[in-house]
Amino acid sequence: MAKIKAAVIFGGTAREHDLSLASAAEVISSIPRDKYEVICIGITRKGRWLYFPGDAESIADGTWDQDPDCTSAFISPDPLHRGIITIENGETSLKKIDVVFPILMGKRCGDGTIQGLLDLSGIPYVGSGVLASASCTDKSHTHMVMDDYDIKTAQWRLITQREINYLDKKCAEISSELGFPLVVKPANSGSNAGVSFAHNSEELLAAVKLAFSSDNKVVIEKYISGRKLEAAVYGYDSPICSAIGEINDPDIPYDPNNFNVSTGDDLTIPADLPKDIEEKVRETAVTAFKALGCKGMARADMFLTDSGELLLNKIGTMPGLRKNSVFPRLMEELGYSHDELIDGLMEQAMDNADRTY
């Protein structure tokens, strides 16, 4: 029986390049070789696409693009090809692909850009499509969808580039409405670049200007103090939610944009929660997943305030996928080993490839 040809795409031009490499190296190592033939495509920090025939260790240490056997490559948008075209010494060749695992994060990577190309190609791929990927990357869109579904988030306001000449006025209006402290974020950013706290008017204005250096929209949120909870959602029509985890290491500073957890060692599973709160976290995670049109997998970050209020912080459509990252650790609690999780994600991508939503 012929093996399934699986392409893993990693790297990218976004700030999350190194996070992508770390996840891709472990995913590639976990793909069962008796079932899959793995084809690696890396995108350099400058945006070059390269077919990489080397090993996962070179991806993990960031030296993969120095391999002399790398050749130019790209996914063809022509569905007749359904594969990757490589270019070597002026000669092109086609590698047919059955499924793509895009391990890409951030701008021009995990924000729907690559997903659009894959939709054109007709090749099944792991994870959410264009709209969900874009909506979850854009924090203002996430807020708007959650507002429509009555899922509570931090109080928020938006400043667009068209209003940049009136920043003093806008900042004064927002601080008057929300009060301090505030968290200021570029609307589209997968990392914590451009994210600041503001405790007064001067800091708010400076924070907004900094955020505009990363995006043309800025989201301002009321700072939330509370327990930081994590949930993994997995599936398509009937997604399931994992056990609930809690980030609880006080020595790791809170990243207001992305709940970045370096290894997952600071995650307690299961979180010590009353049964009704635990069920509410699960329900909220799945409802948000469906509302945003997510597919396959997502990580939901939430706050639980001292008063017992549950607030959604973020839905991540491309969570870290190292064995000790939050999403795999939460799924392991459901009984999914890393190998089974990776295999399952590709299987469901192929099974649902002909579905339209």
Image (tube, helix red, strand yellow):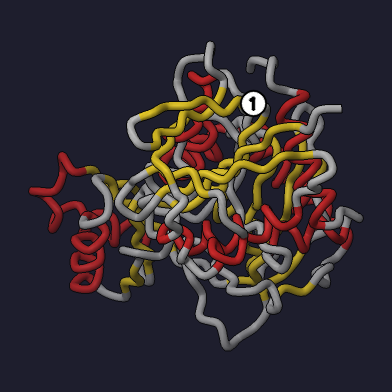
Residue 107 vs 293, above or below: the answer is below
Q: Secondary structure at mark 1?
A: loop
User: Of all residues shown, which one is farthest toward the top?
Assistant: 80
Depth order, front residue of 213/202 = 213
Figure quadrant of the C terminus? top right
Depth order, front residue of 235/208 = 235
User: Of all residues shown, which one is farthest toward the right?
Assistant: 335
User: What percent of the width, then of the height, locates residue 127?
Assistant: 63, 37
User: What percent of the width, then of the height, locates residue 274?
Assistant: 86, 65
User: What percent of the width, then of the height, locates residue 347?
Assistant: 78, 33
Whether residue 188 is visible, yes or no, is yes
215 vs 68, left or right, is left
What residue do we see at 19% from left, 61% from top? 209
Depth order, front residue of 176/333 = 333
Residue 91 vs 187, above or below: the answer is above
User: Of all residues shown, which one is farthest toward the bottom?
Assistant: 251
What residue do we see at 57% from left, 28% from top? 95
- Snapshot quadrant of residue 239: top right
Q: Which residue is mark 1?
A: 124
Label 1 sits on what residue type?
A: Pro
